[in-house]
Amino acid sequence: MTSTRPATRQLRAPGTTPATSRTRRRRSLASRRSNLLTLGMLALLIYFLLPLFWLFVASTKTTGDLFSSFGLWFADDFSLLSNIRQTFTYDGGVYGRWMLNTLFYSVVSAGGAAFLAALGGYGFAKYRFRGNNLLFALVLGSIMVPTTALAIPTYLLFSKVGMVNTPLAIILPSLVSPFGLFLMRIYAQDAIPDSLIEAGRIDGAGELRIFFQIALRTLAPGFVTVLLFTLVATWNNYFLPLIMLNNPNLYPITVGLAAWSSQTAGGGGSTGELVALVVTGSMLSVIPLIAAFLLLQRYWQSGLSAGGVKA
Amino acid sequence: MTDVLPAATAAPPQRGARPKGPSHANSGYLFVLPFLLVFLAMLVMPLAYAAYLSLFREQLVGGTVFAGLDNYTRALTDDRLVEGVWRVARFFVLQVPIMLALSLTAALAIDSGLLRFAKVFRLGIFVPYAVPAVVATLMWGYLYGPDFGPFAQLAEKLGLSAPQFLSESHMLGSIANIVTWEFVGYNMIILYAALRAIPHDLYEAAAVDGAGAFRVAWSIKLPALRPALLLCLLFSVIGSFQLFSEPQLLQRLAPNVIDSSYTPNLYAYTLAFTGQEVNYAAAVSFLLGLVIVIASYTVLLAATRRSRA
């Protein structure tokens, strides 16, 4: 398959300039937009978005309507606002607390992980110190170490030193992102020319100052990429906080929602009311991340492209 | 991935007006040290501690005693663990090809230029990745459910019996559907990013040769996607074998179908927190990590060998 690549290059007519072939390509593409393909992709899109539409519709219903009305359309009674109010006031406002916990854990973890990865990736890419390749290979190999196989040992270690049931138990393990380091190393290699660093040195700037004042700005798209993906990983993390925390006031949103949902499944007491809260709470919890991805798409997409070149 | 390594040293050393590099070279340690310290503390140490713990055994009389490799021989003959490993292996074989085929199709379609509203598709398919596994599982759990799931409602309207998504025979498929829903977009974006990185002159050359969109996809894009596809495959191996959140949450809806050792990770969790068998749980965690590394290498080797042949 790969042999076709040089072949096509050779066959290219010598007279055609890139400009003419590009306009030809654009014209031919515009005329050949495929309706069939668009329809097929539409089916795929519906598969991915319909459940979220269901979630939104469900969060506008009272518990009674949830059971009695058709799931994919609104009931007569539009009770989204009262559901949201109930979600935030139930059990002394613990839901808001979970939201803030999640925000805190994931922002600190993602910021820290992205910073460590940027610093390390830059170091591995731009300095030829002894052991560079060996250490990098070691980190790269650890991409295969599964995080959840690590979680129980980490828990055992933390419980030995009395660190379970604290925010640090969630944040510290989330600071390591071998894949982030890998991405930042590639990114730093491509984005920062050695001459830029050299120019900084000639101007008398120290190595750290060169990094913070020159390199970090150039690394921004890669940084945002690692930041966002670590943010998602921490925001969505369930296993680690589930085993590390048993104080509901420290729960992130995932563990909190799971706890509410287990109360509805367990039966007894005010379970009916809780179903609506689990649904509304779930709906609310996905908004911040989706918003972050949409707002920052320019950055993370260019950051990923750079990683894609050599990944 | 390994071909990135020589690239670092391949760059010609810049010998400018200032005498030499080595003094700069050593300040590289300064940059990589913080990462390596956290790496050591949060990755290497837990692994080493698990390895250490796994060599001991708790006894009712005499406390914790050295047990050598007893925990490992016990794990290898533990039917519950072995069954769980086979189950996630089956899950991998069932789910990953579907997921990657969907991701690949979507990425190629969006990149082809044949699609209207390509950006809407790209973002729309990616959105589920931003949904936590917990929320995705709760949501699909309701959707599957007989109480107010739309499938059951539709079936009832049509006079059919409600589909039993959470029954023993369908459970693995139902979990596979949730995981597929969550991760197609993520893999699609990785593949799409790799597609965008293909040099433009290749397409121009192909256009001059009169290659159609499908020919371009087959002969240029697919070969260029190989490294990115391998990366997706690697992440999928890791993800499949450490399956936890989805079965753990669905357990409440179907306690008779999902037992406490449905997946190896669920089993390790149960051992450590319900059974208080910490040492054995450490051995199981360690073995699971080993299984994943072996599976990763096997899949990578198989994939690279096949594409070379």
Image: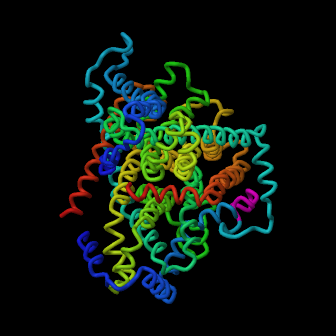
Please say whether residue A61 is one of the residues in the magenta stretch.
yes
Occupied quadrant, residue A164: top right
Q: Residue furthest left?
A: B309
The answer to if A94 sits in the magenta stretch is: no
Asked if residue B56 can be seen in this view, the reply is yes
- On the rendered image, what quadrant is the C terminus of chain B found in? bottom left
- Residue B117 as seen in the image, left or right of residue A88: left
Please, is residue B236 above or below residue B221 in the view? above
The x, y position of residue A206, in whole percent, is 53, 33
Residue at 39% x, 56% y is B232
Which of the 4 image quadrants contains residue B97?
bottom left
Position of residue B81 measured from the top left corner of the image (x, y, whole percent): 33, 39
Which residue does the image show at 46% across and 25% down from the upper left? A156
Examine the image and state in which quarter residue B153 appears. bottom right
**Range shown magenta:** A58-68
Which colour style is shown? rainbow
Could you say which is closer to the camera, residue B283 or residue A269? B283
| Relative image position of residue A120 (x, y in whole percent) | 46, 38
Q: How many labels does the image show?
A: 0
Residues B71 and B11: in front is: B11
Is residue B281 visible to us here? no
User: Residue A193 location, x and y as percent?
Assistant: 45, 50
Looking at this view, name the residue that lies furthest to the front. Answer: B17
- Foreground residue among B5 and B72: B5
